[in-house]
Image (cartoon, helix red, strand yellow):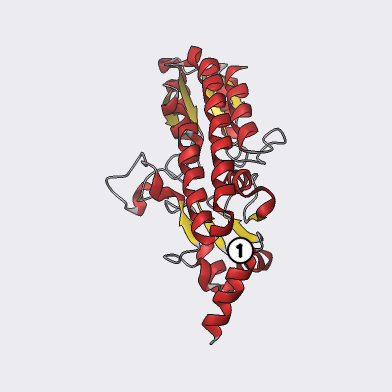
Amino acid sequence: MRLIIGLMFLFFTVAKGEIKVVTTYPYIASITKEIVKEKGKVESLAEGIFDPHFVVPKPSLTIKLRDADLLVINGAGLEVGWLPPLLNQANNLKINPSSVGFLDLSNLVNLIDKPENTSRAYGDIHPEGNPHFHLNPNNIPILADAITQKLCRLDQYNCQYYKNNYSSFKERWDSKIKEWDVRMSPLRGKKFIQYHKLFDYFLLRYGLKSVGTLELLPGIPPNAKHVDSLIDLVRNEKVDRVLQDVYHPQKPANFISEKTGVRITILPHDVGAVPEAKDIYSLFDEIVKRFTQ
């Protein structure tokens, strides 16, 4: 009887256009809002300034999950350290993994940097591959389409509305990609180092090369010996600049810059990581702007 009542409540909520979507990261929330618009409520668990690997599982996040009709996650192990206890506490059967109200976006794209060895001796690696796939702009319409399909499955009443919004989003996104392609084309072939392998998908998309990381190993901060080796790498490989994210310490990058003269470019990795990255469009606008300055 309790199950039947729960299903009736879900139908009523969706039929009234009040679907409640929770996402793990702001970029997913921004994409989802482009599809849902005024037909529901979309919230993100993490904030854009966070290290996406380490989100504090606060009780307020549990409350968001408790009432959700749909949970959309990045996947590829990015949330493995913080999302499971929240789901456990929320006790919402509608959004558990393998349920109809759960969507793992990592299953939709080709993941790069899949490790041959998953031993902890190689650092905090992701066995499934690099989880930062949303930073390839070509992947965004794929994710938006999957979110649209899932919304249609949960809310058939508003399905055509969601599909129309997706079509508008896709048209605008394709136009933006053409703009970004033109602006990024002069940088093709240039070499970079980054703190973490965060921007690999973006670099690969635009024919740029990542030749090293400030991390000694994934999740392991640099030591003096490693920093010295990067100084030699910058000089020998004619590295264009150091790519710095907003949540790792900038001191190692500053030291390398002082010793070599190489520039540092601070890049947002998610919506809200910097004030200018207000939504999924301006996130990529800002990344491209900072690359081409």
Q: Which picture quadrant has residue 287? A: top right
Compared with 226, 150 (above or below) is below
Q: Is residue 125 in view?
A: no
> Residue 251 location, x and y as percent?
61, 34
As drawn, 97 above or below 1: above
Residue displayed at 60% across by 40% down: 270
> Which residue: 48% across, 61% down?
102
Horizontally, is 114 left or right of 231 in the view? left
SS state under label 1? helix
Viewer can see residue 83 = yes
| Residue 232: percent from left, percent from top | 44, 21
* Residue indicated by mark 1: 14
Residue 246, image x and y in percent? Answer: 62, 38
The percent coordinates of residue 231 (x first, y second) are 48, 23
Q: In this view, does 209 lie to the left or right of 20?
A: left
* Image position of 113 (left or right of 14): left
Q: Which residue is drawn at 51% across and 43% down?
A: 144
In the orientation shown, which residue stands out farthest toward the right?
Answer: 275
Look at 48% across and 51% down and name the residue there: 149
In the picture as drawn, the residue positioned furthest to the left comes out as 116
> Could you say which is closer to the camera, residue 103 or residue 288?
103
